[in-house]
Every structure is written in C-alpha cells, then in structure tokens.
Image (cartoon, helix red, strand yellow):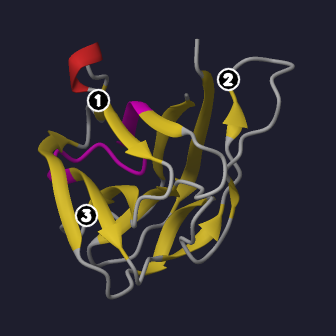
Amino acid sequence: MARQFAVSDAGVTVENADITVVFVNNDAGPAQTLEFLRAWVGQSANATSAQQRVELATQVTAFPTLTSTTPQALNFGEAISNIIGGTAGAAGTSGTDASAEGGGAVTPMWEDAFNVLNGWLWVPTPNEVIRLRAGESSGFGLRMPVAPTTLTNWAFGLVFGEV
C-alpha cells in the first residue's frame, strides 16, 4: 500500500482571477511516483447557488507562487512525505492558494463544473488515477480557471500516494 498524504486548506479567501488552489510538484530525487487519489473543493460563505468550473491540470515552469503547505500523513505514525511545503512550486514541494499563477503552460487533464452549494469531489476508479513520475518537468494542480462569484471561505485539497 502506498504511503498517503493530503495537502489541503480551509477558510481561504481566493484571488479573483483563475487560481491554483493546490499544487504538488514531485521530487526528482527518490525514484517515486505520486498517485493522485482524491480532490475536493467546497465553499461555505453563503447559501447562494452558483456554478463554478474546476480542473486538474499540469503546469510547467514557471510555477505558481503559493502559500507553503506541508503534506499531512493520512496514517498515524507514518514517516513524513518526500514532498515538503514550499512557495515556488519547485520540485519536491507543495502549496495552496496561489497569489500569482506563473508563466508556465497549463494543460488541463480533467475539467468539470459544480454547484458551490454542493461542493466538488473527484475520486477516480483505479484506472483513472493520475500519476506523476519522479523527475517530470511539470507539477500537478487543482485549479479554478474562472473566478468564483464569492471569494471567501473556500476549502480544497488533494490526496496523493507515494509509490
């Protein structure tokens, strides 16, 4: 079984442009693959129905400028992740709530939309798991490519396994 970690944040006020809310970039060091197993987005600021686009995407250099967010182990007593918190989206780092997107090309892999009253949850079947190999030139992000109507009280996250 893969060691599993979550990178998440809650109660966040997001930017008013397209925004990467979670970004993970694999380490070039240990020969590991990251398997992305779950993603979610929700909002709790009001009770007004609104549609929101969301996407899972890769991005190459230059990466987003992020709030450093360290992956948390999902199994108590598990060794720490090979990924550490970082603000530049560099190899071996993770972060949340980008303040700037960076100039790197973004390639959507999975695009969807949801109603903010319900939130959004992506749990792939085994054949749909997205994998990011060690040493890839791109990182993996959860994004809202269109500005949300309400910018406050967002929660979001990614769960990944190190295999």
Quadrant in which residue 69 is drawn: bottom right
Q: In this view, does 160 lie to the left or right of 101?
A: right
Relative height, residue 8 to residue 24 (above, below): above
Q: Which of marks 3 and 1 is in front?
A: 1
Q: In this view, does 137 lie to the left or right of 105?
A: right
**Considering only order in the chain, which callout, 3 or 2, is on the residue closer to the N terminus?**
2
The residue shown at (67%, 68%) is: 86
Q: Between residues 15 and 58, which one lies in front from this camera angle?
A: 58
Distance between the alpha carbons at the discs numbered 2 and 3: 30 Å
Q: Between residues 26 and 32, which one lies in front from this camera angle?
A: 32
Relative height, residue 94 to residue 90 (above, below): above
Residue corresponding to mark 1: 122
Quarter of the N terminus within the rendering: top right
Few, some or many residues within 10 Å of mark 1 (<14, 14–19, 20+): some
Extreme-bottom residue of the structure: 103
Q: Between residues 74 and 19, which one lies in front from this camera angle?
A: 74
Report the disc number at residue 148.
Answer: 3
Is disc 2 placed on a helix, strand or loop?
A: loop
Q: What stretch is highlighted in magenta?
A: 36-54
Is disc 3 placed on a helix, strand or loop?
A: loop
Residue 44: image location, x then y, percent: 42, 44
Q: Between residues 59 and 87, which one lies in front from this camera angle?
A: 59
Amino acid type for the residue under numbered disc 1: Trp
Quarter of the C terminus within the rendering: top right
| Magenta-colored segment: predominant secondary structure | strand
Label total for image: 3
Relative height, residue 106 to residue 40 (above, below): below
Q: Is residue 30 left or right of residue 54?
A: right
Is disc 1 placed on a helix, strand or loop?
A: strand
Res 53 visible:
no
